[in-house]
Image (spheres, rainbow, N blue to C red):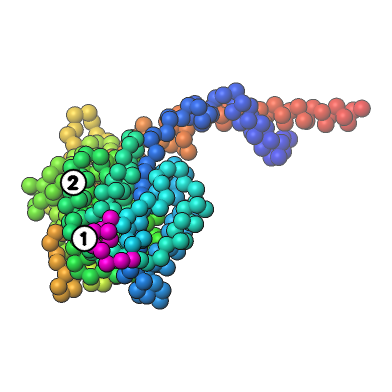
Amino acid sequence: MITRKVLAAGLVSGLFAALSCGLLPASASADDADQPPAGPPPKVELVLDVSGSMRARDIDGESRMSAAKQAFDDVLDSVPDDVQLGIRTLGANYPGNNVKTGCKDTRQLYPVGPLNRDEAKAAVATLAPTGWTPIGPALTAAANDLKGGNGTRRLVLITDGEDTCSINPCDVARDIAAEGIHLVIDTLGLIPDSHTRNQLSCIAEATGGTYTTVQHREQLTTKVRQLVDRSTDTGVTPVATQGAGTCATAPLLKEGIYTDREVFSQNRWYKVEVKPGQELRAAVSVFADRAVNAGYGVLLRGVTQHGREIVRDDEGGTGRTDAVSAGIRYPKPSADTGTPPETVCLQVGNSFSAPAGVKTIPGLPVELSIDFTHGPDDSSDVAFYGLGSGWWLLGLLAATGAVGGLLTGWIARWRLNTGRTD
Protein backbone atom coordinates (compact mmCIF):
# COMPACT_ATOMS: atom_id res chain seq x y z
CA MET A 1 0.00 0.00 0.00
CA ILE A 2 0.99 3.58 -0.50
CA THR A 3 1.80 5.14 2.85
CA ARG A 4 0.58 8.59 3.93
CA LYS A 5 4.15 9.86 3.97
CA VAL A 6 4.76 8.74 0.41
CA LEU A 7 1.49 10.27 -0.78
CA ALA A 8 2.22 13.53 1.01
CA ALA A 9 5.68 13.66 -0.54
CA GLY A 10 4.11 13.12 -3.93
CA LEU A 11 1.60 15.90 -3.37
CA VAL A 12 4.34 18.32 -2.37
CA SER A 13 6.50 17.35 -5.34
CA GLY A 14 3.53 17.74 -7.66
CA LEU A 15 2.73 21.19 -6.32
CA PHE A 16 6.38 22.18 -6.59
CA ALA A 17 6.47 20.98 -10.19
CA ALA A 18 3.37 22.97 -10.99
CA LEU A 19 4.91 26.08 -9.43
CA SER A 20 8.17 25.52 -11.30
CA CYS A 21 6.31 25.29 -14.59
CA GLY A 22 4.83 28.70 -14.06
CA LEU A 23 1.24 27.63 -13.53
CA LEU A 24 0.58 30.24 -10.87
CA PRO A 25 -0.98 33.57 -11.89
CA ALA A 26 1.38 36.34 -12.94
CA SER A 27 0.58 38.32 -9.80
CA ALA A 28 2.14 35.60 -7.66
CA SER A 29 5.38 35.29 -9.65
CA ALA A 30 5.96 38.81 -10.93
CA ASP A 31 9.18 40.44 -9.88
CA ASP A 32 9.70 43.98 -8.64
CA ALA A 33 10.22 45.25 -12.17
CA ASP A 34 6.53 44.70 -12.88
CA GLN A 35 5.43 46.88 -9.96
CA PRO A 36 4.16 50.41 -10.71
CA PRO A 37 6.73 53.14 -10.14
CA ALA A 38 6.62 54.93 -6.81
CA GLY A 39 5.00 58.38 -6.78
CA PRO A 40 6.76 61.61 -5.86
CA PRO A 41 8.01 61.62 -2.24
CA PRO A 42 5.85 63.44 0.32
CA LYS A 43 7.32 66.46 2.10
CA VAL A 44 6.82 67.24 5.78
CA GLU A 45 8.18 70.04 7.91
CA LEU A 46 7.92 70.06 11.70
CA VAL A 47 7.74 73.63 13.03
CA LEU A 48 8.67 73.79 16.72
CA ASP A 49 8.09 76.69 19.10
CA VAL A 50 11.27 77.36 21.10
CA SER A 51 10.05 80.56 22.77
CA GLY A 52 10.71 81.36 26.42
CA SER A 53 7.37 79.98 27.59
CA MET A 54 8.51 76.48 26.63
CA ARG A 55 10.45 76.43 29.92
CA ALA A 56 7.21 75.80 31.86
CA ARG A 57 7.32 72.44 33.67
CA ASP A 58 3.78 71.17 33.28
CA ILE A 59 3.99 68.15 30.95
CA ASP A 60 4.37 64.97 33.01
CA GLY A 61 6.58 66.81 35.50
CA GLU A 62 9.07 68.07 32.93
CA SER A 63 9.42 71.18 30.79
CA ARG A 64 7.50 71.59 27.57
CA MET A 65 10.81 71.85 25.72
CA SER A 66 12.10 68.61 27.20
CA ALA A 67 8.86 66.80 26.30
CA ALA A 68 9.06 68.13 22.74
CA LYS A 69 12.68 67.00 22.35
CA GLN A 70 11.92 63.48 23.56
CA ALA A 71 8.89 63.31 21.27
CA PHE A 72 11.01 64.43 18.31
CA ASP A 73 13.60 61.72 19.05
CA ASP A 74 10.89 59.06 19.01
CA VAL A 75 9.24 60.44 15.87
CA LEU A 76 12.51 60.73 13.93
CA ASP A 77 13.18 57.04 14.57
CA SER A 78 9.92 56.06 12.87
CA VAL A 79 9.75 58.42 9.87
CA PRO A 80 9.03 56.37 6.71
CA ASP A 81 12.03 56.15 4.39
CA ASP A 82 10.22 57.78 1.48
CA VAL A 83 9.29 60.94 3.43
CA GLN A 84 11.40 64.05 2.92
CA LEU A 85 11.38 65.72 6.32
CA GLY A 86 12.64 69.06 7.59
CA ILE A 87 12.57 70.94 10.91
CA ARG A 88 12.04 74.68 11.41
CA THR A 89 12.11 76.62 14.67
CA LEU A 90 10.52 79.83 15.85
CA GLY A 91 11.77 81.89 18.77
CA ALA A 92 14.98 79.87 19.15
CA ASN A 93 17.67 82.53 18.73
CA TYR A 94 16.80 86.07 19.85
CA PRO A 95 16.39 86.60 23.64
CA GLY A 96 16.01 90.39 23.50
CA ASN A 97 13.06 92.80 23.70
CA ASN A 98 13.12 94.28 20.19
CA VAL A 99 9.80 93.32 18.60
CA LYS A 100 11.02 93.82 15.06
CA THR A 101 13.97 91.49 15.57
CA GLY A 102 12.04 88.98 17.65
CA CYS A 103 9.36 88.67 14.97
CA LYS A 104 11.96 87.60 12.40
CA ASP A 105 13.31 84.84 14.62
CA THR A 106 12.63 81.72 12.57
CA ARG A 107 15.15 79.47 10.88
CA GLN A 108 15.35 76.10 9.24
CA LEU A 109 17.08 73.77 11.67
CA TYR A 110 17.19 70.81 9.28
CA PRO A 111 16.48 71.09 5.51
CA VAL A 112 13.56 69.28 3.88
CA GLY A 113 14.98 66.22 2.15
CA PRO A 114 16.15 62.65 2.76
CA LEU A 115 16.40 62.19 6.52
CA ASN A 116 19.63 61.54 8.37
CA ARG A 117 18.18 60.63 11.75
CA ASP A 118 21.37 61.17 13.73
CA GLU A 119 21.98 64.63 12.28
CA ALA A 120 18.37 65.69 12.85
CA LYS A 121 18.43 64.47 16.47
CA ALA A 122 21.72 66.27 17.11
CA ALA A 123 20.25 69.52 15.78
CA VAL A 124 17.15 69.23 18.00
CA ALA A 125 19.32 68.48 21.06
CA THR A 126 20.92 71.95 20.84
CA LEU A 127 17.62 73.82 21.27
CA ALA A 128 16.82 75.82 24.41
CA PRO A 129 13.75 78.03 25.14
CA THR A 130 14.73 81.57 24.14
CA GLY A 131 12.51 84.24 22.64
CA TRP A 132 9.32 85.32 20.91
CA THR A 133 6.54 83.39 19.17
CA PRO A 134 6.50 84.52 15.50
CA ILE A 135 4.04 81.91 14.21
CA GLY A 136 2.95 83.88 11.13
CA PRO A 137 6.50 84.44 9.76
CA ALA A 138 7.38 80.80 10.54
CA LEU A 139 4.39 79.54 8.53
CA THR A 140 5.35 81.71 5.57
CA ALA A 141 8.94 80.49 5.64
CA ALA A 142 7.89 76.86 6.08
CA ALA A 143 5.56 77.07 3.07
CA ASN A 144 8.55 78.18 0.99
CA ASP A 145 10.63 75.31 2.40
CA LEU A 146 8.04 72.84 1.10
CA LYS A 147 7.61 74.21 -2.41
CA GLY A 148 8.66 72.20 -5.44
CA GLY A 149 7.79 68.71 -6.58
CA ASN A 150 4.41 67.03 -6.96
CA GLY A 151 4.23 65.05 -3.73
CA THR A 152 1.96 65.81 -0.80
CA ARG A 153 2.98 68.64 1.55
CA ARG A 154 2.30 68.73 5.27
CA LEU A 155 3.33 71.22 7.93
CA VAL A 156 3.03 70.29 11.61
CA LEU A 157 3.15 73.26 14.01
CA ILE A 158 3.86 72.55 17.70
CA THR A 159 3.47 75.56 19.98
CA ASP A 160 2.37 76.52 23.49
CA GLY A 161 1.06 80.00 22.84
CA GLU A 162 -0.40 82.62 20.54
CA ASP A 163 1.59 84.54 17.98
CA THR A 164 3.32 87.49 19.68
CA CYS A 165 3.76 89.51 16.49
CA SER A 166 1.46 91.80 14.55
CA ILE A 167 0.83 89.37 11.69
CA ASN A 168 -2.33 87.28 12.14
CA PRO A 169 -1.19 83.66 11.53
CA CYS A 170 -4.73 82.66 10.58
CA ASP A 171 -4.59 85.14 7.70
CA VAL A 172 -1.20 83.74 6.75
CA ALA A 173 -2.70 80.24 6.62
CA ARG A 174 -5.54 81.48 4.41
CA ASP A 175 -3.01 83.10 2.06
CA ILE A 176 -1.06 79.83 1.87
CA ALA A 177 -4.24 77.94 1.03
CA ALA A 178 -5.05 80.48 -1.68
CA GLU A 179 -1.70 79.83 -3.38
CA GLY A 180 -3.00 76.41 -4.46
CA ILE A 181 0.10 74.46 -3.42
CA HIS A 182 -2.08 72.00 -1.48
CA LEU A 183 -0.20 72.43 1.79
CA VAL A 184 -2.00 71.04 4.84
CA ILE A 185 -1.17 72.62 8.19
CA ASP A 186 -1.82 70.60 11.35
CA THR A 187 -1.47 72.35 14.71
CA LEU A 188 -0.76 70.98 18.18
CA GLY A 189 -1.20 73.13 21.27
CA LEU A 190 0.84 72.29 24.38
CA ILE A 191 -1.33 73.03 27.46
CA PRO A 192 -3.03 75.89 25.57
CA ASP A 193 -5.42 78.54 26.85
CA SER A 194 -8.66 79.36 25.00
CA HIS A 195 -7.07 82.11 22.86
CA THR A 196 -4.32 79.76 21.69
CA ARG A 197 -6.84 77.03 20.91
CA ASN A 198 -8.93 79.42 18.83
CA GLN A 199 -5.93 80.65 16.87
CA LEU A 200 -4.51 77.20 16.20
CA SER A 201 -7.94 75.85 15.24
CA CYS A 202 -8.32 78.68 12.74
CA ILE A 203 -4.89 77.96 11.19
CA ALA A 204 -5.69 74.27 10.77
CA GLU A 205 -9.19 74.88 9.43
CA ALA A 206 -7.91 77.29 6.77
CA THR A 207 -5.84 74.55 5.12
CA GLY A 208 -7.91 71.44 5.81
CA GLY A 209 -5.72 70.31 8.69
CA THR A 210 -6.51 69.30 12.25
CA TYR A 211 -5.89 70.83 15.67
CA THR A 212 -5.14 68.78 18.79
CA THR A 213 -4.60 69.83 22.39
CA VAL A 214 -1.61 68.02 23.93
CA GLN A 215 -1.19 67.46 27.66
CA HIS A 216 1.24 64.50 27.78
CA ARG A 217 4.52 63.67 26.07
CA GLU A 218 3.34 60.29 24.82
CA GLN A 219 0.30 61.98 23.32
CA LEU A 220 2.56 64.43 21.48
CA THR A 221 4.72 61.60 20.14
CA THR A 222 1.73 59.60 18.94
CA LYS A 223 0.03 62.53 17.24
CA VAL A 224 3.12 63.81 15.40
CA ARG A 225 3.88 60.26 14.23
CA GLN A 226 0.31 59.89 12.94
CA LEU A 227 0.53 63.15 11.00
CA VAL A 228 3.89 62.26 9.45
CA ASP A 229 2.55 58.84 8.43
CA ARG A 230 -0.55 60.48 6.97
CA SER A 231 1.63 62.37 4.50
CA THR A 232 2.38 59.06 2.74
CA ASP A 233 -1.29 58.46 1.98
CA THR A 234 -1.45 59.87 -1.53
CA GLY A 235 -4.40 57.84 -2.79
CA VAL A 236 -7.22 60.31 -2.23
CA THR A 237 -7.40 64.05 -1.65
CA PRO A 238 -10.06 65.00 0.95
CA VAL A 239 -13.01 66.97 -0.42
CA ALA A 240 -14.90 69.52 1.65
CA THR A 241 -18.62 68.80 1.95
CA GLN A 242 -21.53 69.85 4.16
CA GLY A 243 -23.88 67.33 5.72
CA ALA A 244 -27.57 68.06 6.10
CA GLY A 245 -30.06 67.92 8.93
CA THR A 246 -32.08 65.17 7.26
CA CYS A 247 -31.44 62.31 4.87
CA ALA A 248 -33.80 63.79 2.28
CA THR A 249 -31.64 66.90 1.88
CA ALA A 250 -28.26 65.18 2.38
CA PRO A 251 -25.50 65.44 -0.26
CA LEU A 252 -24.91 62.35 -2.42
CA LEU A 253 -21.31 61.20 -1.95
CA LYS A 254 -19.18 58.99 -4.18
CA GLU A 255 -16.09 56.98 -3.26
CA GLY A 256 -13.53 59.20 -1.55
CA ILE A 257 -12.60 61.08 1.63
CA TYR A 258 -14.66 64.05 2.79
CA THR A 259 -14.22 66.70 5.46
CA ASP A 260 -16.94 68.57 7.32
CA ARG A 261 -17.68 70.31 10.64
CA GLU A 262 -20.18 69.11 13.23
CA VAL A 263 -21.50 71.07 16.19
CA PHE A 264 -21.39 69.44 19.64
CA SER A 265 -24.08 66.73 20.04
CA GLN A 266 -25.26 67.27 16.46
CA ASN A 267 -26.32 64.76 13.77
CA ARG A 268 -25.26 65.18 10.14
CA TRP A 269 -26.62 63.20 7.19
CA TYR A 270 -25.05 62.06 3.92
CA LYS A 271 -26.22 59.69 1.15
CA VAL A 272 -24.49 57.02 -0.93
CA GLU A 273 -25.70 54.65 -3.65
CA VAL A 274 -24.76 50.97 -3.26
CA LYS A 275 -25.02 48.82 -6.38
CA PRO A 276 -26.00 45.13 -6.24
CA GLY A 277 -22.91 43.02 -5.59
CA GLN A 278 -21.06 45.86 -3.87
CA GLU A 279 -20.08 46.24 -0.24
CA LEU A 280 -20.16 49.71 1.28
CA ARG A 281 -17.35 50.45 3.73
CA ALA A 282 -17.66 53.76 5.55
CA ALA A 283 -15.65 55.21 8.41
CA VAL A 284 -15.84 58.50 10.27
CA SER A 285 -13.46 60.28 12.63
CA VAL A 286 -14.46 63.27 14.75
CA PHE A 287 -11.55 65.30 16.09
CA ALA A 288 -11.73 67.06 19.45
CA ASP A 289 -9.79 70.20 18.51
CA ARG A 290 -10.48 71.99 21.81
CA ALA A 291 -11.05 71.19 25.47
CA VAL A 292 -13.96 68.77 25.91
CA ASN A 293 -15.60 66.98 28.80
CA ALA A 294 -14.75 63.33 29.40
CA GLY A 295 -17.25 60.70 28.34
CA TYR A 296 -17.93 61.39 24.67
CA GLY A 297 -18.75 59.20 21.71
CA VAL A 298 -19.22 59.02 17.95
CA LEU A 299 -22.02 57.28 16.03
CA LEU A 300 -22.05 56.12 12.40
CA ARG A 301 -25.33 54.59 11.24
CA GLY A 302 -26.65 53.36 7.89
CA VAL A 303 -30.42 53.49 7.31
CA THR A 304 -32.78 53.15 4.38
CA GLN A 305 -34.59 56.16 2.97
CA HIS A 306 -37.64 54.99 4.91
CA GLY A 307 -35.77 55.11 8.21
CA ARG A 308 -35.03 51.42 8.77
CA GLU A 309 -31.65 50.88 10.37
CA ILE A 310 -29.30 48.64 8.37
CA VAL A 311 -26.03 48.80 10.30
CA ARG A 312 -24.44 50.92 13.01
CA ASP A 313 -21.28 51.43 15.05
CA ASP A 314 -20.66 53.69 18.01
CA GLU A 315 -17.39 54.26 19.82
CA GLY A 316 -16.64 56.11 23.06
CA GLY A 317 -13.75 58.29 24.19
CA THR A 318 -11.92 58.16 27.50
CA GLY A 319 -11.23 61.87 27.92
CA ARG A 320 -8.03 62.19 25.91
CA THR A 321 -8.28 64.99 23.38
CA ASP A 322 -7.81 63.26 20.09
CA ALA A 323 -9.95 61.58 17.44
CA VAL A 324 -12.77 59.08 17.94
CA SER A 325 -13.65 56.84 15.01
CA ALA A 326 -16.44 54.47 13.99
CA GLY A 327 -16.86 52.27 10.92
CA ILE A 328 -19.50 50.15 9.18
CA ARG A 329 -19.75 47.60 6.37
CA TYR A 330 -22.90 46.90 4.35
CA PRO A 331 -22.87 44.23 1.60
CA LYS A 332 -25.68 44.39 -0.95
CA PRO A 333 -26.31 40.96 -2.51
CA SER A 334 -26.12 40.54 -6.28
CA ALA A 335 -29.39 40.70 -8.19
CA ASP A 336 -30.65 40.47 -11.75
CA THR A 337 -29.21 42.92 -14.25
CA GLY A 338 -31.11 46.17 -14.20
CA THR A 339 -31.73 46.31 -10.46
CA PRO A 340 -31.22 49.95 -9.42
CA PRO A 341 -28.69 50.95 -6.75
CA GLU A 342 -29.92 51.26 -3.17
CA THR A 343 -29.72 54.68 -1.54
CA VAL A 344 -28.24 54.39 1.94
CA CYS A 345 -28.44 57.29 4.36
CA LEU A 346 -25.41 57.74 6.62
CA GLN A 347 -25.93 59.42 9.96
CA VAL A 348 -22.91 60.85 11.77
CA GLY A 349 -23.56 61.88 15.37
CA ASN A 350 -21.51 62.77 18.40
CA SER A 351 -22.02 63.18 22.13
CA PHE A 352 -19.28 65.72 22.80
CA SER A 353 -19.81 68.44 25.38
CA ALA A 354 -17.58 71.33 26.33
CA PRO A 355 -16.62 72.98 29.63
CA ALA A 356 -17.98 76.44 30.36
CA GLY A 357 -16.30 79.12 28.31
CA VAL A 358 -15.23 76.85 25.44
CA LYS A 359 -16.68 77.87 22.09
CA THR A 360 -18.70 75.28 20.21
CA ILE A 361 -18.61 77.23 16.93
CA PRO A 362 -17.11 76.31 14.49
CA GLY A 363 -18.03 72.66 14.92
CA LEU A 364 -15.66 69.77 15.44
CA PRO A 365 -13.65 68.57 12.40
CA VAL A 366 -15.14 65.47 10.75
CA GLU A 367 -13.41 63.14 8.27
CA LEU A 368 -15.67 60.68 6.44
CA SER A 369 -14.33 58.00 4.09
CA ILE A 370 -16.50 56.13 1.57
CA ASP A 371 -15.28 52.99 -0.19
CA PHE A 372 -16.96 50.31 -2.31
CA THR A 373 -15.66 46.78 -2.82
CA HIS A 374 -17.07 43.65 -4.41
CA GLY A 375 -19.50 41.88 -2.14
CA PRO A 376 -18.72 38.42 -0.76
CA ASP A 377 -21.01 36.71 -3.30
CA ASP A 378 -19.47 38.41 -6.33
CA SER A 379 -17.47 36.04 -8.54
CA SER A 380 -14.84 38.71 -9.24
CA ASP A 381 -13.91 38.98 -5.59
CA VAL A 382 -10.39 37.99 -4.59
CA ALA A 383 -10.30 34.43 -3.28
CA PHE A 384 -7.88 31.96 -1.72
CA TYR A 385 -4.96 34.21 -0.86
CA GLY A 386 -4.43 35.89 -4.21
CA LEU A 387 -5.44 33.09 -6.59
CA GLY A 388 -8.37 35.29 -7.62
CA SER A 389 -11.28 33.55 -9.28
CA GLY A 390 -8.99 30.89 -10.83
CA TRP A 391 -10.43 27.88 -9.04
CA TRP A 392 -9.56 25.85 -12.14
CA LEU A 393 -5.93 26.41 -11.25
CA LEU A 394 -6.46 25.11 -7.74
CA GLY A 395 -8.06 21.98 -9.19
CA LEU A 396 -5.18 21.53 -11.61
CA LEU A 397 -2.65 21.80 -8.80
CA ALA A 398 -4.53 19.25 -6.70
CA ALA A 399 -4.84 16.83 -9.61
CA THR A 400 -1.16 17.21 -10.51
CA GLY A 401 -0.18 16.56 -6.90
CA ALA A 402 -2.40 13.47 -6.69
CA VAL A 403 -1.00 11.96 -9.90
CA GLY A 404 2.53 12.74 -8.75
CA GLY A 405 1.81 11.06 -5.41
CA LEU A 406 0.45 7.93 -7.05
CA LEU A 407 3.43 7.64 -9.41
CA THR A 408 5.88 8.17 -6.57
CA GLY A 409 4.11 5.53 -4.49
CA TRP A 410 4.09 2.90 -7.26
CA ILE A 411 7.73 3.53 -8.03
CA ALA A 412 8.65 3.18 -4.37
CA ARG A 413 6.65 -0.05 -4.11
CA TRP A 414 8.27 -1.48 -7.26
CA ARG A 415 11.75 -0.71 -5.88
CA LEU A 416 10.94 -2.42 -2.60
CA ASN A 417 9.67 -5.54 -4.37
CA THR A 418 12.70 -5.60 -6.69
CA GLY A 419 15.02 -5.31 -3.72
CA ARG A 420 13.42 -8.32 -2.02
CA THR A 421 13.81 -10.61 -5.07
CA ASP A 422 17.50 -9.79 -5.27
Q: Are marks 2 and 1 in contact (CB under 8 Å)?
A: no
Q: Amino acid at mark 1?
A: Cys
| x then y, percent, for residue 138 | 28, 53
Mark 2 and mark 1: span between their CA atoms?
17 Å
- Pick whichever, 14 or 66, lies toward us: 66
Give the secondary structure at mark 2. helix
- Residue 34, relative to residue 119: is it above or below? above
Residue 46 is left or right of residue 241, and the answer is right
- Pick whichever, 106 or 335, lies toward us: 106
Residue placed under numbered mark 1 in the picture:
165
- Pick whichever, 226 or 317, lies toward us: 226
Disc 2 residue crowd, few under 14, some 14–19, many 20+, Cα 10 Å: some
What residue do we see at 46% from left, 46% from top? 115
Tell me if I can see residue 238 in this picture.
yes
Q: Which residues are magenta?
A: 95-104
What residue do we see at 41% from left, 46% from top? 111
Instruction: Locate residue 136: give its quadrant.
Output: bottom left
What residue do we see at 40% from left, 55% from top? 225
Q: Earlier in the sequence, mark 2 or mark 1?
A: 1
Residue placed under numbered mark 2 in the picture:
175
